[in-house]
Amino acid sequence: MPPMRRPHQLLVGTETRDDAAVWKLDARRGLVATMDFFAPVVDDPRDYGYIAASNALSDVYAMGGKPLYALNLVGWPRSQPFEILGEILAGGAEACRDAGCAIVGGHSVDDLEPKYGLAVTGLVDPRRVLTNAGARPGDVLLLGKALGTGIAASAIKKGIAEEHLVKAATAQMRQLNRAAGEVYAKNYKWVHALTDVTGFGMLGHLDSMMRAAKVRARIDAAAVPVLEGVRELAREGVVPGGTRANLEFVSPRATFPERMTEPDRLVLADATTNGGLLAAVAPKAVSKLLKSLANAGASARVIGEVVRSKKPGIDVSGEISTSPVR
């Protein structure tokens, strides 16, 4: 993007690769602006619509905000039945109803393949914005949801995904990050950095968080939840191109155990759809936050810590658990 003069109202822009922009209206109100859309990741059109909308809404929750309204973004081939598009839009509308977010319009274009998503506007208190840039040495890293939906979606497209994986991946991608976002927003004093795990994968989004704060993460791979069957698919080469690009991008700033295979590294970098929130929180608040998240139906796990370092990045230890999440 060409350089531009930064308006004083712009609290969060593009500098740290954050999840959304934040524009200050006044002392108590800031607008959160984001958009996201993609091609189908599951076969059922209504599920696809719900997932795509949830994924777009997630960026507002990752800033500590509340979605206000959204605009539909649609690419649709004229050769495909418009009844299917109706189902996709119905799924998106259902997700927005569950989020308390109004759909107020949108735009569609003729396209070679279906695409759907939202442009979302949210609201946040400018004094309580949660960005990806405030992690501190000593912080504990919390991750919600399991990894592996990108690999699962590739298997679904190839028609080789087992039924239990299809159900687990679909259910997880449909899960709004509203509950987790509300918990973190309520406890903003203890949440030093927050992001959601989406297209750049856990390693990619964590890398952005560490680079923004000029610190380093230590991750225990055994503590990272992974959907059952995903490791085996990665070993068979069922991996989306985005996941491979993610690992290539982050590798210069990451270290892995010598015994960790490339497929397991790819799982940690998997290009995720509507993944969980990833937070760097004060150690004394960990127990309280984990309990609050569990009570809200948005359980999270401790996966590592933040340490002081002259070289921002990520150090991975251990091995991915052999008891993955269903």
Image (cartoon, rainbow, N blue to C red):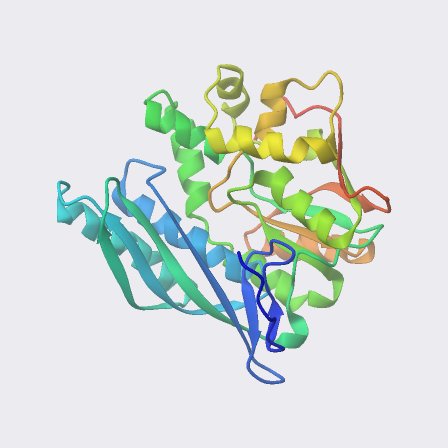
Q: Is residue 321 above or below residue 114?
A: above
Q: Horizontal placement of 288 versus 201: left or right?
A: right
The number of numbered discs placed on residues in the rendered structure image is 0
Q: Is residue 169 above or below residue 276?
A: above
Relative depth, front residue between 323 and 23: 23
Q: Horizontal placement of 3 versus 72: left or right?
A: right
Residue occupying image coordinates x 47% and y 29%: 241
Q: Is residue 134 above or below residue 324?
A: below
Q: Residue 6's quadrant in the figure? A: bottom right
Percent x, y of residue 50: 35, 51
Percent x, y of residue 279: 67, 52
Percent x, y of residue 256: 73, 26
Q: Residue 264's quadrant in the figure? A: top right
Relative depth, front residue between 55 and 183: 55
Residue occupying image coordinates x 38% and y 47%: 51
Q: Horizontal placement of 320 versus 32: left or right?
A: right
Q: Residue furthest bottom?
A: 26
Q: Is residue 193 visible?
A: yes
Q: Residue furthest front?
A: 2
Residue occupying image coordinates x 32% and y 55%: 92
Q: Is residue 220 visible?
A: no
Percent x, y of residue 192: 73, 59
Relative depth, front residue between 234 and 142: 234
Q: Residue 220's quadrant in the figure? A: top right
Q: Is residue 4 above or below residue 239?
A: below
